[in-house]
Every structure is written in structure tokens, then in C-alpha cells.
Image (cartoon, coloured by chain):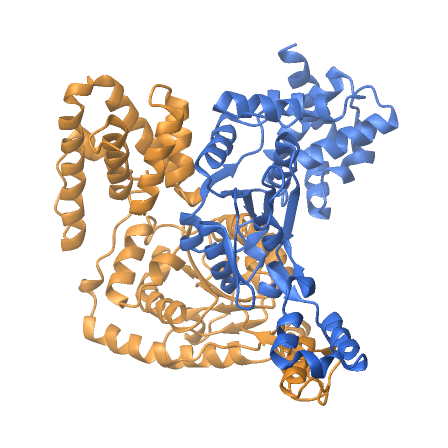
């Protein structure tokens, strides 16, 4: 195919716009996009839109960004003649690149207030502060992270449907292995083999409250979450504030600095208000009850200050508690003398919590790992004792 | 059936009473013409699985369905050996005295021949030599372990399966592959990159009316409009499980069976269980008032008449 065909230019230019907007677009997707364009043509906006959507998007969450990027891209495309089209594309790309450099330097220098740049930044209404971790005592946080990654967050295993070989006689015959043995013994069935269900790690879901009141703790706890995501399998991480943000992918980078930088770029409501109930509802509707939380160990890191209706929070906690294996609430304020769970949100959530623990220091986090490792029956007994008292 | 354009695909789906949005029709068209698997995500009950069934009807081909579940492995998805028959064969050969004459190697060759091969869904889909290539539906891929996706990679990119004892099977014409996911976990990027992606939305009001009319012909137009309007209102109510198209159809069918001419409060009360499956959702609807819901449904149903 001719590399300078309009379809090629269009595909490459649009892919670059998407990348600039934070969507991961691998090269092979662009190639498929080009062949898709050759099938649907370039004339009809809808056809091009859906061809681009089917080939370049792989997550529904990216749809809003994609929509806006496409609108900008297409309007520009039809506004200019094909002859000047190439030039136009370059200018767009250039602006995105300059924005990238800004991010890398992580300085808050204002980006060129040119129209294109503005529209491509997709800044949300809640222009809450983008946090700079460098402002914190870097060495201490690093040391803390080292300690955090040494914590083992296993938790009681869950029975899996997958079968594994058993050493003792069981109820399920492993005919495959028996047969192999038969062949090795010249067709003589001497020994029978068995299989039994294996166990697997329970999913660990961690929700971090990043509202203003949690600010002193959020930095360190985020590092703790990073250590958890990198350190074990089947971890899901979210932040709660005025909205719910899934940060598992961002935290998955082994390099803590990169992971945290990506996360802070992804989260737009640092140190804002808290709507715990609504965020939990969002979680339950879109992720949790569907089955992400089902059978999981569920950890909420929050001080329980909630500006929303306590009723909403209570209702959502109930939903969560029904599907989760265990719900653990980590409250950094718990350690202060005379603390009682009186904050409205905290009080509303209390009846649905299996374990209520501190989270203000490394020792407290170590305690948390012990709680996670505990069998759920102990916790349930504890809850009963608490609710009877 | 020739599907040469997006419009062809849409009208073919239409003929089989599947009303697809522009986006979905384009995605299907591209999946067919580019030979790429199509990954569908969306709320439960929006017609992801149904699409695969309809595609099989349109192409007049077989539908091979692989329902994924936790712990599924190659032996259950690709192929397995029929061990009991192999054992039996061994015994027979021994009893007839044939075993000593043919020699161990040949005997083993006999055991691992196609005669004792159990073809599971993926191998069936690939090893087809007659007629149109089948539609392969890999349902709820998110329920399988992520290790299982690695098996799928080879199958979905090269449409081939290698069996060490027998060699490589390769599809002469690749099957049309539809994968569905309910997003209980993220499907690996490596797999997603081999697929085209589409997020299936709930249909808009007019399309939903049309779907009800097509699927439940015994229901009159005005009732179909009311049902679609009521469901539309329910979806805006922040329910635990907003009703999907499947529930709309169930509801309309139930109403048709009851011989209901139009919605009223008592009918809605009595049949709400076909649409909402959570006690809390029922309560929420009751709190906000069934009468309001019926009223909304009536108004919406009339408007564009």
C-alpha cells in the first residue's frame, strides 16, 4: 500500500492524537485501522468513527476521551482542504509533544494557551491540584516503600475449580496421568492417579480515600497500594474522592516513581471533598457487585468523613458486605486518644465492617497484613461481639 | 449471503430480527471483511450472545459455543484424548493377541490417532472442511483464568492448533469469532489487540420499541411503546441492575401472555419481577411510585405517535 495515502495519514495522525490524550494505541492497531478504512471509506463520518472505535479502542472507559478526540480531529479534517491537511496534522502533533515534555519534567509551567492544546488536554471541571510527590520527604517515603513491599498480603486462599494432582486417594480420577503410566508400563494399569481441587489467592480490592482530610496519609498509603499491586497477583486499586478512579493499571509499573506519577496524572480529585457513598455506589454498580468484589478481601483506607448522605453509604456498604469475603476498614484517625467512630460516614459504615484497624504508621500497616491473613470466621465473631457491646 | 458493506450487514441482521446500531453493524462488517475476532463488552442482557447466534443464522453456518468458566483449560477447550476407549483398545489388542505382532511403537501410534481424539469447541471451529466456516462464540471470556487467554492467542491469530501427536490443524477458511466479556476483570491487552472492540449499549427508545414488536408480535404497538418507555424510565432510576433488552422482551412476553392491553398500576406491580431481580430495586420503584412510572410510560408512549 502507498504509505502517503490519505487513509494512512489520517490513521497515523489520529493515533497520535489519541496517544497524546493518554490512550495506549499500539502500532498494529493503527495498521488494522488503515485496512478498516480501506473497507469503509473516508467519506462518511459515522463509518470512520466506528471503524476507528472498533480498531483503536480496547476499554469502554476510554470512550469519552475518544469521542472528544475524534470530534476535534474530524472537524479539523473537513475544515481544511486535503492539500493543507498534512500541515495541519503536524501542528496538532507538535502541540501534543510539547505537552508530553511538560509532563515528563513534572513542572507546572503553563502550557501554550493555544486553542488546539486546550481542547486536547481534556481537563475536567474539577481542576483539583495535581500533586507533586517530590515535595514530600523523599527519602522517608522511599524507605517506607521498601518496608511496604516486604509485607506479605496473602490472605486465606479460596477454593478453585481448577484441579491439581493429589497425593492421596480422592474422588476424582486423573485418567490422563493414569493412562500415561499405563503406556510406560507396557499397557499394564498398575497405579491409579487422583486429582483434587486446588486453591487460589483471593482477590484483594483496595479503595483509598484521597479527600482533603486524608491528605497527610494518602501519599504513604498510595505507596502501600503500589507495593500491594506490584507484590501480589489479583489486586485491584481504586481512589475515592468526589469520584471513583481505577488506578490498578497505573500502579502496576514496578518503578514506584513512575507508577505514582502516572496515578497522580490519572486521578483528578486529589484533596477535594468526599462522597464516599456515591463513590461506593459507582464501584458497586460498575465493578464490585458484578463480581470484582465477590469473594474478595475488601480494604477501604479512609477516615470516614463523608459529605454525602450517610444513608447512601450504609446501603452501599451493605451491598458490598454481602458479596465480599471480608470488609476491612483502615482508619488512620483511629489511633488518636478518645477516638470514636462518630464521623457520620464512619458511623453509618460501622455495622457492615468485619475488621476496623489503624493505618497511620508502618506498624499499623503491618498489623493490617496480619488482619488480612486471618481467617474470616474470627472476624465475624469479632463483629458480633462489637455489635452486641 | 454476501455482506459487502455496512448496510448489507445491518439489513441482514434486521431480517433476523436483530436491530443493530450503526457502530455494531460496522464492527461486525469489519470483523467479517478483515477476518478479525470481535470482542463485545457491555451490560448483561444487551444482546451480545444473541448477536453470535444471529450471525450463524445469517451465514447459514454452524454456531460453536465455548462457555468459559474458572479453571477451563486446553483439554476442555481444544481437544482431549478418549482415555477410556484407549484403555479398552489396549485390552482388546492384548486379548486378541495382536499386541505382540504389531509392536509397541505401532500400538502407541494407534492409540494417538484421530480415532481417539475428542474435538472440543476450538478444534471443531478450526478443523472444518465443509461448507461455510462456523461462527465461534467464546462466551464470557472474563470468567476464564488469564492463563487460558494465552491458549487463545495462537488460535485467534493464526487459526491453528498444534497437537504434538498428530501435527498442526489449520483452518482453511477462518471461523468468524465473537468474544463476549462482562468485565469482571480486564482481558489482557495482548488478546484485545488481536480483536476488534465494541461496547454494546442499551438501545434507544425507538429501537427498543421496534425490538419488542419484532420479538413479541402478539403485543400491540401501544403496549410495546409503553413497555419500552417504562424500561427507559427504570434505567434512569439508579437501580442495582438496570434492565437490559432481554428483560424488556421477557416483560413484554409476560404481558402478552396475560392478555394485557395496556400498562396499569396493578399489572406493573404483578409483573415487575420479570424486569427487576433485586428486592432493593423493587423497593426503590415502589418508593418513587409505580403510578408515576405508569404515567411516564403512557406519556412517552403517546408522544411520538
In the displayed orientation, state which residue is furthest to the front.
B101
The answer to whether residue B74 of the structure is visible from this angle is: yes
Q: Which of B193 and A327 is in front in this view?
A: B193
A226 is higher (above) or lower (below) than A365: above
Horizontal side of B112 relative to A20 (left or right) equals: right
Where does the C terminus of chain A fall, quadrant-wise? bottom right
**A5 or B139, which lies in front?**
A5
The quadrant the N terminus of chain A occupies is top left
Q: In this view, does A353 lie to the left or right of B198?
A: right
Residue A116 figure quarter: top left
Quadrant hosting residue B163: bottom right
Shade representing chain A? orange
Q: How many marks?
A: 0
The residue lying at 68 percent from left, 40 percent from top is B284
Image position of B203 with respect to A281: above or below:
above
Residue at 79% from the left image edge and 27% from the top image edge: B265
Question: Chain coloured blue: which letter?
Answer: B
Rendered location of residue A370, percent (x, y): 49, 81
Residue at 78%, 17% (x, y): give it: B220
**Residue A134: x %, y % from top left:** 18, 63
Name the one closer to the observer, B148 or A192: A192
Rendered view: B187 above or below B52: below
State the image coordinates of residue A29 (x, y, percent, origin top left): 34, 43
Whether residue B229 is visible to the viewer of this picture, yes or no, is no
Q: Where is residue B254 in the image (x, y as percent from the top left)?
A: 81, 32
Most distant residue in the right direction:
B258
Amino acid at each position: 500500500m502507498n504509505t502517503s495515502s490519505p487513509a494512512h495519514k489520517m490513521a497515523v495522525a489520529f493515533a497520535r492524537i489519541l496517544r497524546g490524550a493518554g490512550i495506549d494505541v499500539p502500532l498494529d492497531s493503527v495498521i488494522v485501522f488503515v485496512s478498516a478504512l480501506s473497507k469503509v471509506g473516508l467519506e462518511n463520518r459515522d463509518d470512520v468513527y466506528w471503524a476507528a472505535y472498533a480498531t483503536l479502542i480496547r476499554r469502554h472507559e476510554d470512550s469519552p476521551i475518544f469521542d472528544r478526540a475524534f470530534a476535534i480531529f474530524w472537524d479539523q479534517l473537513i475544515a481544511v482542504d486535503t492539500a493543507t491537511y498534512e500541515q495541519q496534522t503536524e501542528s496538532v502533533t507538535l502541540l501534543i509533544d510539547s505537552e508530553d515534555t511538560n509532563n515528563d519534567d513534572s513542572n507546572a509551567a503553563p502550557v501554550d494557551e493555544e486553542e488546539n492544546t486546550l481542547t486536547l488536554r481534556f481537563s475536567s471541571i474539577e481542576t483539583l491540584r495535581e500533586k507533586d510527590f517530590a515535595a514530600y520527604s523523599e527519602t522517608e517515603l522511599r524507605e517506607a516503600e521498601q518496608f511496604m513491599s516486604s509485607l506479605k498480603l496473602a490472605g486465606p486462599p479460596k477454593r478453585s475449580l481448577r484441579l491439581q494432582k493429589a497425593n492421596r486417594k480422592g474422588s476424582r480420577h486423573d485418567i490422563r496421568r493414569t493412562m500415561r503410566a499405563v503406556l510406560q508400563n507396557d499397557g499394564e494399569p498398575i497405579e491409579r492417579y487422583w486429582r483434587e481441587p486446588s486453591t487460589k489467592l483471593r482477590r484483594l480490592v483496595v479503595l483509598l480515600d484521597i479527600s482533603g482530610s486524608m491528605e497527610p496519609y494518602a501519599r504513604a498509603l498510595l505507596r502501600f497500594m503500589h507495593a500491594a499491586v506490584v507484590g501480589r497477583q489479583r489486586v485491584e486499586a481504586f481512589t475515592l474522592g468526589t469520584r471513583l478512579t481505577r488506578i490498578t493499571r497505573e500502579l502496576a509499573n514496578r518503578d514506584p516513581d513512575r507508577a505514582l506519577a502516572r496515578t497522580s496524572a490519572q486521578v483528578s480529585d486529589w484533596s477535594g471533598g468526599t462522597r464516599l457513598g456515591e463513590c461506593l455506589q459507582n464501584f458497586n454498580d460498575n465493578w464490585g457487585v458484578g463480581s470484582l468484589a465477590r469473594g474478595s478481601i475488601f480494604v477501604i483506607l479512609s477516615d470516614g468523613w463523608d459529605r454525602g448522605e450517610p444513608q447512601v453509604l450504609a446501603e452501599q456498604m451493605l451491598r458490598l458486605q454481602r458479596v465480599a469475603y471480608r470488609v476491612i476498614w483502615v482508619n488512620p484517625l483511629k489511633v488518636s486518644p478518645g477516638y470514636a467512630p462518630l464521623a457520620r460516614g464512619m458511623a453509618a459504615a460501622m455495622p457492615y465492617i468485619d475488621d476496623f484497624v489503624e493505618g497511620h504508621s508502618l506498624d499499623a500497616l503491618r498489623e493490617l497484613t496480619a488482619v488480612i491473613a486471618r481467617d474470616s470466621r474470627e472476624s465475624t465473631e469479632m463483629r458480633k461481639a462489637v455489635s452486641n457491646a | 449471503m454476501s455482506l459487502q458493506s455496512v448496510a448489507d450487514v445491518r439489513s441482514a441482521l434486521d431480517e433476523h430480527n436483530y436491530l443493530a446500531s450503526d457502530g455494531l453493524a460496522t464492527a461486525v462488517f469489519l470483523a467479517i471483511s478483515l477476518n478479525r475476532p470481535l470482542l463485545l463488552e457491555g451490560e448483561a442482557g444487551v444482546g451480545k450472545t444473541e448477536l453470535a447466534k444471529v450471525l450463524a443464522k445469517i451465514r447459514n453456518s454452524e454456531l460453536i459455543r465455548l462457555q468459559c468458566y474458572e479453571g477451563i483449560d486446553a483439554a476442555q477447550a481444544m481437544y482431549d484424548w478418549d482415555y477410556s476407549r484407549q484403555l479398552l483398545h489396549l485390552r482388546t489388542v492384548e486379548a486378541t493377541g495382536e499386541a505382540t505382532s504389531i509392536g509397541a511403537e505401532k500400538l502407541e501410534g494407534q492409540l494417538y490417532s484421530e480415532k481417539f481424539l475428542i474435538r472440543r469447541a476450538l478444534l471443531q471451529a478450526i478443523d472444518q472442511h465443509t461448507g461455510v466456516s462456523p461462527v465461534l462464540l467464546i462466551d464470557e471470556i472474563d470468567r476464564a483464568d488469564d492463563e487460558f487467554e494465552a491458549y487463545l492467542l495462537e488460535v485467534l491469530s493464526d487459526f491453528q492448533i498444534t497437537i504434538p501427536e498428530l501435527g498442526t490443524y489449520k483452518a482453511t477458511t477462518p471461523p468468524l469469532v465473537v468474544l463476549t466479556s462482562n468485565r469482571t476483570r480486564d482481558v489482557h491487552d495482548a488478546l484485545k489487540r488481536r480483536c476488534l472492540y465494541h461496547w454494546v449499549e442499551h438501545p434507544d427508545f425507538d429501537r427498543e420499541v421496534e425490538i419488542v414488536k419484532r420479538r413479541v408480535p402478539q403485543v400491540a404497538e401501544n403496549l410495546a411503546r409503553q413497555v419500552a418507555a417504562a424500561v427507559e424510565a427504570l434505567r434512569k432510576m439508579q437501580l442495582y441492575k438496570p434492565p437490559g433488552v432481554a428483560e424488556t422482551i421477557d416483560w413484554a412476553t409476560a404481558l402478552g401472555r396475560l392478555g394485557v392491553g395496556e400498562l396499569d398500576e396493578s399489572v406493573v406491580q404483578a409483573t415487575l419481577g420479570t424486569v427487576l431481580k433485586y428486592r432493593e430495586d423493587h423497593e426503590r420503584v415502589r418508593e418513587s411510585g409505580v403510578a408515576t412510572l405508569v404515567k411516564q410510560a403512557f406519556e412517552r408512549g403517546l408522544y411520538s405517535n
